[in-house]
Amino acid sequence: MKRKIETALLGLLLLTCSGCSDWLDVTPQAQVNADKLFSSPEGFESALYGIYISMTSTETYGQNATYNLMDVLAQYYAIYTNKNHNMYEASVYNYENEDIKYLVDAMWLQNYNTIANCNILLERLANKDELYFTAGHYNLLKGEALGIRAYLHFDLLRAFAVNYSKDPDGMAIPYAESFTKKVHPQLKASVVVEKILADLNAAREVLKSVDPVFDDTFRDQNMNYHYAQPYKNDIFMSYRAYRMNYYAVTGLMARVYNYIGDKENAYKYAKEVIDAADDGAFWFASEYDVSAPLKNRDVVMQSELLFALNCSNIQDIYYSIDAKNSSTLSLLEVNNIYGESSDFRHNLIGESTTSGKTISYKYAKIDSEMGGKIPMIRLSEMYLIAAESYYATDKEVAADFIGTVRLMRGISSDVKSDTYEQLIEEVILEARREFVGEGQLFYLYKRLNHPVIRNNANVELTTAQYCLPMPANEV
């Protein structure tokens, strides 16, 4: 990349985020230099926390890579008829518009900046002995940094490169494996995928021996060690759902293999997570959790999040968007998406107190104590991947995976699966219901070469419209 990636440096590591949870309160103060930061085990841990915080920026998962730009492209919102809306040009896929180009460029640069910080951490870590750290912390640091690096590269690949099934050997994005002033060249999509999977395999290898998610206490639903309670007085080992834990890495591998059409491995890794959930590692949110009074409503269904970003000010960010008619994200065709009255996901949407529009409650300022989370990988996706990847083996079992998701949401309707095309439509329907505000739906349409659904009509996209344009001075 021609724009020097070192502009990231430690700026992102030095962010503070009061209210992003107690375990983030140890993040370093501004302008601490690298040598001082990495002069203690706690400094390494603070650097990792800083990386997670940088992922919550509005340029990426705190706004544009989730509920704003990426979900606008997925046509979740009633924007395409409103030329006064500041995301109108995105809703009609006009990436040449200067405002939209700015958002796209910022998402690219911010993700590579965060990748640069992962590389700084990994390179500093390579010069330290495991015994320098509290038992297990070295492997957590390494595994999580590798997992984040893979996650960010994969989203860049999905957003900016041509669909893999169309051109696996086409030039895609750079893969930054080191912190350097040298240009990281663009690579073929297939090479980028190889590097992503190499990072994920390495992350799994170092995490599997130390990640607390394997501890039986993480199966205790009353304790909720994944997201609610500290673990054995070791904050760095706690709240694994908000870190790139072993199962998050495994779920991401299922996502990557599904992306490249390797159905055998997609099923293998999705099923590993499903089996872990059956063993109590994760569990679907109940109707009570999702329909409780707003203050106690589990708006992100957190017990089923394999990985989420923790940032309570997401509600303030979303509120600032919702409060303006020119930016409010009013959901489209809600009654068609949630057609069955028994589907309790209806409780995750409602009328905005500021705009009066129908919005998602996942990030809304509704005073929910369960808010402040940005879902990155959830359990239901593993079931959808398993359904899609197992169809050729047993279409009835494949349909049962979707049926399980529906049953867990209060729906008993049959899954149509006489043909693979029917099953895919069922996968898309559940994805539209599940991933509101999470930035995943557009990638699903793109991977399947499927038209984007809007108001029960299909919007046919060109190859160029499916690809965000790389910044001109980066190529």
Image (tube, rainbow, N blue to C red):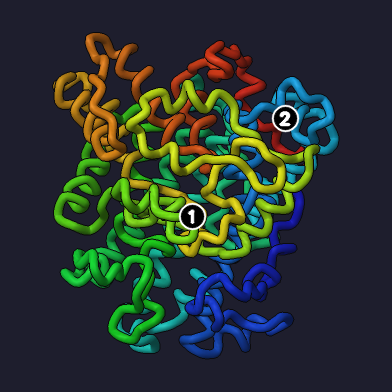
For discs 2 and 1, the disc positioned in front in the rendered view: 1
* Residue 257 higher or lower than 110, as above or below: above
Q: Could you say whether the residue bearing mark 2 is in a helix, strand or loop?
A: helix
Q: CA distance from mark 2 to mark 1?
A: 32 Å
Q: Residues within 10 Å of mark 2 (few under 14, many from 20)?
A: many
| Above or below 99: residue 390 | above
Residue under the point 53% across and 14% down: 456
Asked whether, in this view, residue 228 is left or right of residue 184, the answer is left
**Who is closer to the viewer here, 355 or 324?**
355
Q: Amino acid at mark 2?
A: Ala
Q: Badge 2 is on which residue?
A: 90
Residue 29, x across and y down, in percent: 67, 83
Q: Quadrant of residue 262?
A: top left
Residue hosting label 1: 294
The quadrant of the picture occupied by the C terminus is top right
- Residue at (31% x, 38% y) in the render: 409
Q: Which mark is residue 379?
A: none
Element marked by disc 1: helix
Judging depth in this view, the residue of 146 and 370 nearest the camera is 370
The answer to whether residue 200 is visible is: no
Q: Position of residue 249 (x, y in %)?
A: 35, 53
Residue drawn at (44%, 47%) of the image: 195
Q: Nearer the viewer, residue 271 or 360?
A: 360
Q: Quadrant of residue 47?
A: bottom right
Q: Is residue 280 visible?
A: yes
- Disc 1 marks a residue whose amino acid type is Leu
Crowd rating for badge 1 (residues with CA inside 10 Å; few <14, some 14–19, many 20+): some
The mark that comes first in sequence, 2 or 1, is 2
Q: Is residue 276 left or right of residue 95?
A: left
| Location of residue 7 by image quarter | bottom right
